[in-house]
Image (spheres, rainbow, N blue to C red):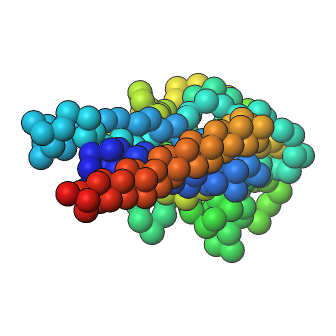
Amino acid sequence: MAGGHYVALSGMRTRLDELDRLANDIANVGTAGYKAERTGQRAAMRPVFDDALETAIDASTGGRRLDARAGAIASTGRNLDVAIEGRGFLVVDTPQGVRYTRNGHLNRAEDGSLMTADGAVVRGVDGPITVGTGALKVGDDGTVYSDGAAVGKLAIVEFKDAGALVRESGALLRGDETPTPVALPTVRPGSLEQANISVVDRVAELTNVNRSFQALQKAVSVLMNDVDGKAIDSLGRR
């Protein structure tokens, strides 16, 4: 296959990756604490063609990075909804290990522990927080109160490079870097951080990706049908 085919086909492959990313973002517009991702593209040289055909370059999707910018904070009036102002992530325990999230939609489990909406156990600064059956309230510094008595404080950490965090699902993130505790976290009780996604921007991106995919598809069709067809016809006459 000629080098031009590889260039066009690899370009189509990257557009499919972009469509997956955009679809995931649009599907999570209503997920509290959700962070979008950004991707780049890179040229991947194929050594086999370097000498024979210098234009034989494949386009491939570059590494993904989390868009860690804060989303808008909306009031919910619910005692166990919390939003973190500025930098920081809640620390949660999952069956796969420690994870991080900005989704502060918390619930009280049957055993009295705090859990996220998807069932992860929320960590406290001094270990698990047991809230019992009393009336719950979260203070501006992340301290959790049950019937007016402090029962623990939410563990809130930050990363030097939050963009390197990897999404596992929704607003749940995994990080290889060791985080550091936020010294003086600011928490907005009775509120949730919204997804940092603009639907208008995503629809515009979706349109551009679709158009470029169609253009590449047409290029492949021209290369496969017209160019190769003419070459076969020309050679057949000799």
Question: What residue appears at the point 40 percent right and 46 percent down from the top-left corner?
Answer: 8
Locate residue 153 relative to residue 135 in the image: left or right: left
Number of numbered discs visible in the structure rendering: 0
Where residue 119 appears, x then y in whole percent? 61, 67
**Residue 184 sits above or below residue 89 on the image:** above
Percent coordinates x, y for residue 224 in the rendering: 39, 57
Is residue 234 visible to the viewer in this orientation of the structure?
yes
Image quarter in which the N terminus is found: bottom left
Q: Quadrant of residue 82?
A: top right
Measured as percent of width and height from the top left, residue 199 is found at 76, 41
Residue farthest to the right, as pictured: 77
**Residue at the bottom extreme of this rendering:** 110
Residue 15 shows in this picture: no
Residue 45 in percent (x, y) is at 22, 39
The quadrant the C terminus occupies is: bottom left
Q: Is residue 149 above or below residue 232?
A: above
Q: Nearer the viewer, residue 14 or 226?
A: 226
Report the side of 95 relative to 131 (left or right). left
Residue nearer the viewer, 164 or 74: 164
**Residue at image location 68% in from the left, 62% down from the top:** 117
Taking depth in this image into account, of 54 and 148 the one nearest to the observer is 54
Q: Nearer the viewer, residue 205 or 36?
A: 205
At x 71%, y 37%, the residue is 204
What residue is rendered at 33% in x and 44% in y? 4
